[in-house]
Amino acid sequence: MKKSLSYILPALILTGIISCKKVFNPHLNTVTTNFLAVDSPVISGDSTFITLSRTTKLSDTTQNKAELKAQVSVEDDKGKLYALTEKGKGVYVLGVTGFDPSRQYRLDIKTSDGKVYQSDFVPLKITPPIDSIYFKQNSDATVLFYVNAHDANNTTRYYRWDYKETWSYHALYTAFFAYDKGNFDTIKFDTPQDLHTCFRTDLSNQLFIGTSEKLAKDVISNQLLGGLTANSEKIGQTYVMQLRQYALTQTGYNYYQNIKTNSEELGSIFDAQPTTTLGNIHCISNPSETVLGFVSVSTVSNKQFNLRYSDLPIRIITTYDTIDNLINPLSARYFPPPTIDYNICTWPGPPPPPGNTPPPPPPQYGTPWAILFGPGATFNFRANRTFGKGDSLIINYDVAPGPGGSVIGYYYAPKPCVDCRVKGGTNLRPSYFPPN
């Protein structure tokens, strides 16, 4: 009996402890926010975009609080001013300007409430060109991007990179003809009528810095620029990286290194402890006020890198790659809209328009449509046209066998299956994007 109690009593005690658990609500001091944050460098030889915003609380519904109606200018050490123009959403722009490399520069800001902010004077750094951009795939088929650069004069030493990325994607089905007021109009490839291929653009959201300070020569080799997972839509067709490289002062590099440490390298007891990261911008009206950001001044070097899915040594085939969508599955992949049930793209669809035969049974993946309808059937026309509430489009039609056969039925699918814009992109190819 005593032996039994030796097991029961600890269990009862543990049960009591668990049953008495209460939610812990820590009483935290009120966190001061609404600090001015200044983002983006001053660029010589290209346009300058300065973004002003205010910090917010984590509980705030609006995380991006733009600073509006400010007066912003670049000032050199002889008092010459270059005024920026407000473009909305906290963005202020200075057109292409070539600054004197013998001068030093700072940023002047006067906010709508009358406060004055200034950065420290900093020298204009000349950025060397980007040597090359390349990629590798790891064992998980993740695509990793790298950059190489060097300065033959050994005067740069500190570097920062960011980039704009643009990628193409396509709808499941292609429309070759558009139906408008009883007529079929040819859809020309790569025009505003073409709804098969779309493009989306984003900006890098990571901080990339590098230094050659410990090397005899000013060389940056194999600098990692992040990567894309093997199942990312961004590398499903063609991916374009427009890389920008900036030269930094040592002070600027140290600032970004602290930002990188605090935001990316904390999480274990062995990591560096978080530090207060203050930049080179100050509130002249109230010196005790915290201001976030660092203003650097430099030229910028640009380089574009194009990557096609067919260039990848390791290719990941998805469920949708076997669908007959007039695209080589080894050179492009289909990604359905995340909020759309793919099953709506298969036949039978909604009721056909009056006067047309019902759609045939849904084909099996990989089965050519001509085989389903017998010899003589042709499928070289596809058309797009909204029906009813605009949720379905014609994607194909069948003709009677033999030369000069008449149309005997239309095949169609809901709009998400044929209109790539449903996913939020544009069907207008950017001028810098390579042809499909």
Image (cartoon, grey):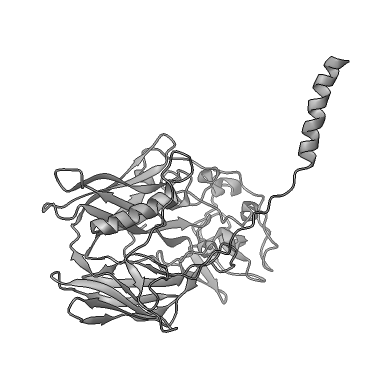
> Where in the figure is residue 324, as x and y percent of width and height?
52, 48
395 above or below 109? above
Q: Residue furthest left?
A: 153
Q: Nearer the viewer, residue 23 or 332?
A: 23
Q: Is residue 425 left or right of residue 43?
A: right
> Where in the figure is residue 262, as x and y percent of width and height?
42, 51
> Where in the figure is residue 100, as x and y percent of width and height?
15, 73
Q: Nearer the viewer, residue 230 or 113?
A: 113
Answer yes or no: is residue 236 visible.
Answer: no
Which of the image's four quarters has the C terminus? bottom left
405 above or below 14? below
> Where in the figure is residue 110, as x and y percent of width and height?
37, 81
Answer yes or no: is residue 84 visible.
Answer: yes
Which of the 4 image quadrants contains residue 21?
top right
Q: Is residue 297 left or right of residue 269?
A: left
Q: Is residue 239 left or right of residue 1?
A: left
Q: Residue furthest right?
A: 1
The count of marks equals: 0
Q: Nearer the viewer, residue 174 or 112?
A: 112
